[in-house]
Image (spheres, grey):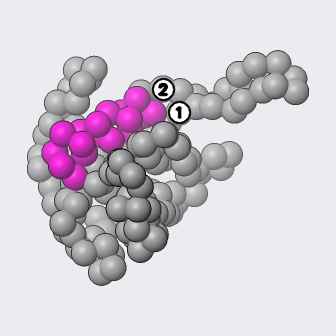
C-alpha cells in the first residue's frame, strides 16, 4: 500500500517489508490523523504563503530498491502504484480536495465511513490509460469529526 503526500513531498508506505491485512486501513487512518494534526496546529494558516496539504493514496505492489553506493544509499520504491498515488494527489488539487483515494484502497480498508468522503466515479488521471474510481474529501469537512 502506498500513501503519498504532496507539498515538499513525503511518501509513507504500509506493507513493507511484510504485507498485513490492515495496511489499507492503517494508511487511511494515518492520512486522517495527518490532516487533523496539521489543521489543529494551524500549520497551513501560519505560513507566510500557505501551501495546502493534499494527500493521494493508492494500493498495490511496488518495487523496492536501494539507490546509490554503500554509505550514501537511499531506499526508494517505484512502479505504477507510486505514480498513481502521485497523480491522485494532483487530482485532489484539481478537484479542490484535501484527500483523493482510489477505490482499491477504499475497498481494502473495508469501505470506511469517513465523514465528508464521497465517490466521484471514474476519473482519467494524467499519464494513465484507464480511468480510476475516485473518492475525495473536500477542504470544507470538519477535520475534528474525523
Reading the image, the residue beneath label 2 is 79
**Does the magenta segment cover residue 91?**
yes
Residue 6 visible in the shown view: yes
Q: Give the vertical position of 127 relative to 55 (above or below).
A: above
Q: Within 10 Å of the Cα at label 1, are there few (<14), some (14-19), or many (20+) other Cα atoms?
A: some
* Label 1: which secondary element: loop
In the picture provided, is 101 more to the left or to the right than 37? Answer: left
* Label 2: which secondary element: loop
Q: Position of residue 94 (x, y in %)?
A: 18, 39
In the picture provided, is 135 more to the left or to the right than 12? Answer: left
- Whether the residues at callouts 2 and 1 have beta carbons within 8 Å, the answer is yes
Q: Residue at x 48, y 40 (%)?
A: 8
In the picture provided, is 38 more to the left or to the right than 45? Answer: right
Q: Residue at x 28, y 54 (%)?
A: 98
Of residues 12 and 38, the one nearer the viewer is 38
Quadrant of res 122 = top left
The magenta span reads 81-97
Reading the image, the residue beneath label 1 is 62
Q: Position of residue 33 (x, y in %)?
A: 45, 68
Q: Give the vertical position of 66 relative to 90 (above or below).
A: above
Amino acid at each position: 500500500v502506498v500513501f503519498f503526500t504532496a507539498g515538499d513531498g513525503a511518501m509513507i508506505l504500509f506493507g513493507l517489508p511484510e504485507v498485513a491485512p490492515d495496511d489499507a486501513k492503517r494508511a487511511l487512518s494515518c492520512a486522517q490523523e495527518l490532516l487533523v494534526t496539521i489543521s489543529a496546529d494551524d500549520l497551513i494558516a501560519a505560513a507566510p504563503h500557505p501551501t495546502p496539504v493534499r494527500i493521494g493514496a493508492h494500493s498495490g505492489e511496488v518495487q523496492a530498491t536501494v539507490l546509490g553506493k554503500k554509505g550514501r544509499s537511499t531506499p526508494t520504491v517505484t512502479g505504477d502504484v507510486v505514480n498513481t498515488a502521485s497523480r491522485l494527489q494532483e487530482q485532489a488539487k484539481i478537484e479542490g480536495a484535501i484527500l483523493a483515494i482510489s477505490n482499491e484502497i477504499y475497498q481494502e480498508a473495508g469501505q470506511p465511513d469517513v465523514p465528508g468522503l464521497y465517490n466521484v466515479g471514474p476519473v482519467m488521471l494524467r499519464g494513465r490509460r484507464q480511468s480510476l474510481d475516485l473518492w475525495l474529501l473536500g477542504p470544507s469537512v470538519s477535520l475534528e469529526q474525523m
